[in-house]
Amino acid sequence: MYPQKMSATGPQPVPDLDGLAPVGARDADTFVAACDLAKARSYIHYFPFLHFYGSDGRLRWERHGDTVLVYQIRRRNAGGTRMTLYLPPMPFDTAALHHALERMQHFNKSKSARINWVAEEDVPKVARAGFSVFFKMDEFIYDRAAVMKLEGSGFSRLRRELSGALRTSNLEIRPYRPADEPACLAVLEDWEERMVAAGIKLTVGSYATRACLAQSDRFTYPLLTGMVAEIDGEARGFAFGGRLSSEMGCAYLFHTDPRFPGLPELLRYRLMEAYPDLSCFNDSGDSGRKGLQQLKQQFRPVEMHGRFGAQMN
């Protein structure tokens, strides 16, 4: 939960958080409108991601003029808390960034400030504001229409994977239901065990996946769509995604049983198929995992969209 301090009458919100609200489901329209104005293209702008990632209170937001500002409140190992700007103002506004900088410096009692994530289109503007910007990762952006057609030699491997998956006996791809949560949690926990066994550190995003499984019914199409891959009546994979902006979709979450090859590709294909009005989909990065990179390259990304961080000392 977000930090509190004690008083004679019990825990009280930290005053420096006054005016900042949790990223609630009711805020979806405000955020999506801001994404449209900003022409947002990054995974970090997808509202259900922000909502579920902030479900423990770590993300807070405010309006400043016509922009949306999202902050992260971090507990420090040495004690206390620290505020960062989770992403630049949406849409970008220099005055709003200066306001956020002053809030962070006041909260942290320090001249230093950090922006967790900066989409590549915002890099020049953030740098002009005095931040040092550094590269963190690339995101895969797909042309939805090209993926749907699957034409040409570039899609040959994806065609084979999809054909193989569709030949699986008693396979059904159907909408996610709240009753699917326990079975999908089992798929997630199996994936987590495999990552740990391979020496791959789990990210803090695992709790956000659990929040999505438990609370996905807070959102409906087109903002969020959930799918389950069932084989012989048993959940073997799940996916979530939806509309990021009026043109861009987000391939948000995918977890599958590795004993059934082709399911990750099929779930991505079916998710994009459900959004004929969108032109592109952002499938985030590859976490430095070669297998995940190879999987996403099958969709022939038309853009590797840079994601950066920023620091002011």
Image (spheres, rainbow, N blue to C red):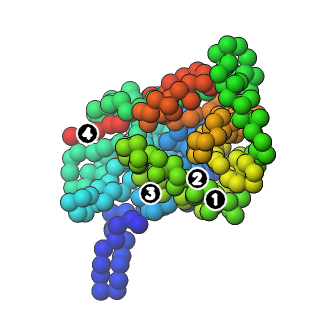
The reply to whether discs 4 and 1 touch (Cβ–Cβ < 8 Å) is no
Q: Residue furthest bottom?
A: 8
In the rendered image, which residue does mark 3 sit on? 60
Which residue is identified by label 4? 312
Q: Residues within 10 Å of mark 4 (few under 14, many from 20)?
A: some
| Residue at mark 4 to residue at mark 3: CA–CA distance | 21 Å
How many residues crowd mark 2 within 10 Å: few (<14), some (14–19), many (20+)? some
Task: Say whether marks 2 and 1 touch (CB < 8 Å).
Answer: yes
The residue at the point 52 percent across, 55 percent down is 189
- When the figure is inspected, residue 266 is found, relative to residue 155, above or below; the finding is below
Mark 4 or mark 1, whichever is nearer to me? 1
Name the residue: 75% across, 22% down: 149
Inter-mark Cα distance, 2 to 1: 7 Å
Circle 1: residue type? Ala
Secondary element at tag 4: strand
Is any part of residue 25 visible from this angle? no
Q: Which of the marked residues, 1 or 3, is nearer the chain's N terminus?
A: 3
Asked if residue 250 lies left or right of residue 285, the reply is: right
Type of the residue with mark 3: Arg
> Residue at coordinates 65% horizontally, 22% vertically from top-left?
157
**Residue linked to disc 1:** 183
Helix, strand or loop under label 3: strand
Q: Are marks 1 and 3 in contact (CB under 8 Å)?
A: no
Kindly report the distance in space between the C-alpha atoms of the residues bearing marks 1 and 3. Answer: 31 Å
Mark 1: few, some, or many residues within 10 Å (few <14, many ≥20)?
some
Indicate which disc, 3 or 2, sits on the residue closer to the N terminus: 3
User: Which is more toward the observer, 183 or 137?
Assistant: 183
Q: Which residue is mark 2?
A: 187
User: Are the residues tagged 4 and 3 within 8 Å (C-beta)?
Assistant: no
